[in-house]
Amino acid sequence: MEKNNLKIKASNFVMQHAGKLRDHYRIGKMLGSGAFGEVRVCVHRESGAQRAVKVLRKSHMDEDEKRMFFNEINILKDLDHPNILKMYEFFEDEKRYYIVTDICKGGELFDEILARGKFTEKDASCLMK
């Protein structure tokens, strides 16, 4: 979007906070976990909005993985589309990185494919809708 020759990008609204995540969010139950960390439900203290926070342990990441992580952040910051996960904020402390995003419920697509045994294009379109 341009107005008076000023470009407004989604990345202008995604903030990195020097403060603590828990100062801004109440952390809830775990939604999933992986090799580097976990994803938890969180609630924004000021607005009450329910979101997800991806928590990544720095000690479990080598330099290539950290570079890929920051690449993910930069990509998410620039995306603004109703069908793509929205990133709200980014936090960092001595031991962890935190990415606050939309919360997506419904589980892993891969798990659904395994449970069904076969997965047609029609199945995928119904699930995505």
Image (tube, rainbow, N blue to C red):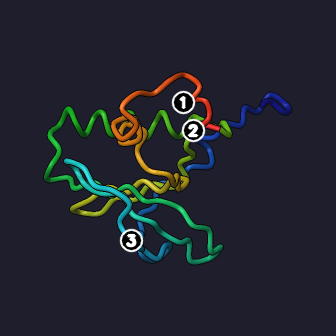
When asked about the image quadrant of residue 61, the answer is top left
Amino acid type indicated by mark 3? Lys
Amino acid type indicated by mark 1? Ala
Real-space CA distance between mark 3 and mark 1, rounded to the nearest whole angstrom:
28 Å
The residue at which mark 2 appears reads as 127
**Picture coordinates of residue 4, whole percent (x, y):** 85, 32
Is 23 in front, or is 80? Answer: 80
Q: Earlier in the sequence, mark 3 or mark 1?
A: 3
Classify mark 1: helix, strand or loop: helix
Q: Which residue is the extreme one toward the top? A: 121
Classify mark 2: helix, strand or loop: helix
When asked about the image quadrant of residue 72, the answer is top left
Q: Which residue is pictured at 38% across the width and 71% down the height?
A: 29
When asked about the image quadrant of residue 119, the answer is top left
Q: Which residue is the extreme one toward the front? A: 117
The N terminus - image quarter: top right
